[in-house]
Amino acid sequence: MRRILLVAQREYLQIARTKSFWLTLVLMPALFLIMPLIASLASPKDTSSFFIADPSGRYAAAIEQRLAFDHQRQILSALAEYATRWDLRAKAADAVWDDGARSFSDEEVRAFVAGGGFRKALQEAGPLGPDVPKFIPPGRTLFAVPVPADVPATQGVEAFRIAAVDHLAGEQGDANPVAAAIWIPADFGPAGSPARIWTGPSGADEIVEMVRRELNAAVRADAAKNAGLDAATAQRVLDATAPVTISAPPRGQGRERMMLQSALPLGIAYFLLMSIFVSGAWLLQGVIEERSNKLLEAVLACISPTELMYGKLMGIVGIGMTVVVVWASCLVGGALLAPGNIAQLLGPAIASIQSPWLALALIFYFVTGYLISAMIFLAIGSISDSMSDAQAYLTPVMMVQTLPFIVLGQLINNPDATAAKIMSWIPIYTPIAMLARMGGGVETYEVVGTSILLIAFVALELFLLGRVFQASLLRSGQPPRIGQFVRMMFARRGS
Amino acid sequence: MTVLAFNEVIKTFGGFTAVGGLSFSVPQGQVFGFLGANGAGKTTSLRMALDILRPTSGEIEVMGAPPGRAAADKIGFLPEERGLYRGMTCLGVVTYFGRLKGMSAGDAKARGRALLDRFGLGDWARKPVQKLSKGMAQKVQLAAALVNSPRLLILDEPFSGLDPVNQRMLEETILEMARDGSTVVFSTHVMQHAERLSDRLLMLAGGKKVFEGSQTDAQRLLPGRVLLTAKGEPKGLPGVQGFTALSSSDGWTDWNVTLKPGAEPGDLLQACIERGFALRNFETRRASLHDVFIALVGAPKDAMAA
């Protein structure tokens, strides 16, 4: 055991002294830090604006009112989501914001605004708990701006078009360019001229949709009036929506709960993949160095191949655990120091792991998953004379190994699907498949059964790796073919 | 006490017999030369002694026990193919091997430092191996083999790749180890090293022993020769198997005389004196190890490298 620990210590220190180790250790937390920044830079612009010429004088004001109204709808949706997340309750029975985030009708939005909007709603909900962050209403995203001075709004549609198109093109490169120009003719209507919209190069889908919706409403209101309906009846007709009752699991249950419970296992699965890729390369380099530097014979005179193998495994497992602990500590520390979306997810995700057995299972699947991959890397290293030799084996092996990550989404969404269950019983896929499925809840027999199978597989892999290690370490010449590799596994010791 | 013993050891790889029925023993304190051409089975035999390979049949004893890592603490080994951990310091490598051989960290470090100082590498102890020249690296490898003050030192082709200065240093180290009571087993196909160092020799050919004994024993395997300058022809003298004239001058002839097996040059000289055979010069010529090796093994190309 002393010799195994010596080898493990040397492996660990050799890797820990490399620049690549420290770079890896720092790089991942740095990515965690800058990812939100990159995401915000990559996300579309928050606001969009347009100008509108309305010779008819009937529609521009209505469109602007619609903008304000839709903004209130966004606030109501955000408030409903916030209320669900932090378990806020309205005192009034007819309040619409405490019934979960959903699509709100115009009538509901009008009631919300008439009831005092989000400020009044929050007052009704009472004082917030100490852990509940303040509600920040979403900002308005669409704005109507005055028609620019270089665009004539009273000289006919053609003059407007030429100037507006030039203006939109000239806006490119500005921080917040105007996205669309709208012309609503004096004789706009089904029997008259069409409204015209010119968009800038960056597109203006949201504006087009909003204008079309508002003009449709106006045209339909005119049609209702022409049909003899009074204004109130016409409005009721326009606001009418089909009554649909949607039954969903209670708050914090169902898919929401599943996603929350999946967060930690999934995080562990991703850490597993990353740490395997990173530390596997180090492990390969270590074994190949001993082969290519012709060190092995001197080492094997002092220590048996099996001891050498165990030592290397222990060393690399130590490195992998160090990497994961540092990454996880940075993630948790960062979340605690800078509360945000990750912190809001992390706390409940950890809290959702209520059973110590579940926590144990997560650790078990991580460690066995790591061991299985480390042993595969070790076997490849023991039969390779160079990294290019190793690459020839590594590519197909990694393709096979990463299969569960390709279907991870399906595993999470359909944890009880036949494919997911089958994958859970294939030992090299068991750790990832089970980690991915655990959020959705798996049967106890599956956890126990796959764990037993996994332990047996690790033991078998260890035994076969020992044979390969023994047979291949002093081998020279071309890397073995598959047949030779299999024969190595079953060769007598020392042959 | 026998430190290393092989008894009818056979090692095959598939259908190929690398070592065929090898038996020998090495007493304590001897320098034992393992001679053979490349592929003769020297390295395979040494690997079996170190338990890196297991024999197909036969028995091996190392210090009274079957080969195993338990004896590793008392064995030093310098393989033919040598390497070092390039990222480690010189002292780190030597200390690591010392600790693998059961030494405490403190002892291994102290002994490692002493060896590096002795080999002129004291100033390089803290420097990484990758900065060393090849000759320096070879000294570090030797220090790693010697760090545990081994009772049995096994050296596989230790002189290959060494410059003359390092060859001399290694020869001195081997002789010093033997003086201190250690047993040294080394393989080589360079006969001069074997002649200078070996107390006993074992010659291998095709995995089989063709000779085991002292250098004198080996030389006796070939007929002795005498160079003499005489007035007459050495015909009829006792022990003479054959002779050829090399040159003649003023009635004196230089003769190359081949003795019969077992005949001693001293007896021939005595006979010359007793018979009044006029002699001006009498030189004995012993067969060299190289001659014996060629005679026993043949003349493979690599064996002629000496």
Image: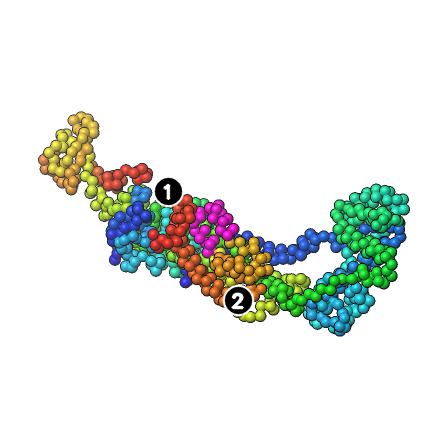
Q: Mark 1 falls within which chain? A: B
For the record, the magenta segment spans A374-400
- Label 2 SS: loop
How many numbered discs, if any?
2
Please identify the residue farthest to the left as the structure is shown: B275
Which corner quadrant of the image does residue B283 belong to? top left
- Residue in the picture at 23% in, 48% down: B213
Density class for disc 2 (Cα within 10 Å; few <14, some 14-19, many ≥20) is: few
Image check: A209 left or right of B63? Answer: right
Q: Quadrant of the N terminus of chain A?
A: bottom left
Tag 1: amino acid: Pro
Residue B109 x %, y %: 43, 58
Which corner quadrant of the image does residue A130 belong to? bottom right
Viewer-nearest residue: B205 or A97: A97
Q: Which mark is residue A443?
A: 2
Residue A398 among magenta residues: yes
- Residue in the picture at 47% in, 48% down: A393
- Label 1 SS: helix
Distance (Cα) linking label 1 and label 2: 73 Å
B82 over A246 or under it: above or below: above
Residue A43 x %, y %: 70, 53
